C-alpha cells in the first residue's frame, strides 16, 4: 500500500485547524500509521525540501517551517498519494478548488497549511525521513471492510 507523509505546518497549528484537517483524512478512510508533534531544524528541512533549496522562496519557507512546532503524520491507503493531493488542493490556495483543504482554509502559497508527498516513491522516502521504524504502527483497521470492496488484510 502507498504511504504519504503529511505535515501540518505552523499555520495549521497556530490557527487551530489541526483537528479539522486530520478529520478530513480520517473521513476519507485513510489509515494513520504514525503521528507526532515536532520542531523542524534546518538539516531536516533542507533534505525534505531538497528540490526547492536553491529557489528564491526557500529562505522564507525554512524560517516559516521553524517558526513553531508542526504535527507530522504518516498515512497509508490504496493508491493514496494522488488522492491525498486531491484533498489538499493546489499549491496556491487561491487557485485551489473549493472543498479542498487549501481551497477552503488558506489564501497564500507561503501559508498553505499542509504538506503531502507528491509520489509513491517520495511517500516512502519522506515517511522514513520523519519516522523511525518504532514510531510506525502496523494494525488492522476494521473499517477497511467498509472502505474498500476488496482488500488484503
Ligand atoms: P506542494 O506543497 O503543493 O507540494 P511545492 O511546489 O512542492 O508545493 O512547494 C513546497 C512548498 O514551498 C509549498 O507548499 C509552499 O509552502 C512553498 N512554496 C512553493 N512555491 C512558493 C512560492 O512561490 N512562494 C512561497 N512559497 C512557495
Ligand atoms: Mg511538493
Image: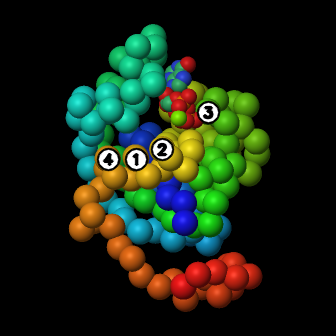
Residue at (39, 41) in percent of width and height: 10
Q: Secondary structure at mark 2?
A: helix
- The residue lying toward the viewer, choosing from 45 and 16, is 45
Residue marked by disc 1: 125
- 110 relative to 95 in the view: left or right: left
Q: Secondary structure at mark 1?
A: helix
Q: Earlier in the sequence, mark 1 or mark 3?
A: 3
> Does residue 33 show up?
yes
Locate residue 39: give its quadrant.
top left
Give above or below for 69 relative to 79: above
Locate residue 14: give its quadrant.
top left
Give above or below for 1 relative to 51: below
Residue at (43, 59) in percent of width and height: 74
Q: Earlier in the sequence, mark 4 or mark 2?
A: 2
Ligand 1 closer than 8 Å to label 3 CB: yes
Q: Earlier in the sequence, mark 3 or mark 4?
A: 3
Give above or below for 79 relative to 140: above
Q: Secondary structure at mark 3?
A: loop
Mark toward the viewer: 1 or 3: 1
Residue marked by disc 4: 129
> Does residue 13 show up?
no
Q: How is the image coloured?
A: rainbow
Task: Find out whether the residues at labels 2 and 1 contact each other: C-beta distance under 8 Å.
Answer: yes
Question: What's the mark number on residue 122?
Answer: 2
Question: What's the mark number on residue 91?
Answer: 3
Task: Find out whether the residues at labels 1 and 3 contact each other: C-beta distance under 8 Å.
Answer: no
Mark toward the viewer: 3 or 2: 2
Task: Bin the neighbour count of mark 4 within 10 Å (Cα to Cα): few under 14, some 14-19, many 20 and up.
Answer: few
Amino acid at each position: 500500500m502507498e504511504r504519504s507523509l503529511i505535515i501540518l505546518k505552523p499555520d495549521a497549528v497556530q490557527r487551530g485547524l489541526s483537528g479539522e484537517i486530520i478529520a478530513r483524512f480520517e473521513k476519507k478512510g485513510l489509515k494513520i500509521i504514525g503521528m507526532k508533534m515536532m520542531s523542524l531544524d534546518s538539516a531536516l528541512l533542507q533534505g525534505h525540501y531538497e528540490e526547492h533549496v536553491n529557489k528564491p522562496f526557500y529562505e522564507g519557507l525554512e524560517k516559516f517551517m521553524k517558526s513553531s512546532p508542526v504535527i507530522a503524520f504518516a498515512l497509508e491507503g490504496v493508491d493514496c498519494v494522488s488522492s491525498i493531493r486531491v484533498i489538499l488542493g493546489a499549491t496556491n490556495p487561491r487557485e485551489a478548488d473549493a472543498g479542498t483543504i487549501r481551497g477552503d482554509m488558506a489564501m497564500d502559497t507561503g501559508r498553505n497549511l499542509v504538506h503531502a508527498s507528491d509520489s509513491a516513491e517520495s511517500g516512502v522516502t519522506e515517511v522514513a525521513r520523519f519516522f523511525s521504524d518504532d514510531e510506525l504502527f502496523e494494525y488492522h483497521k476494521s473499517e477497511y471492510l467498509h472502505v474498500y470492496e476488496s482488500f488484503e488484510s
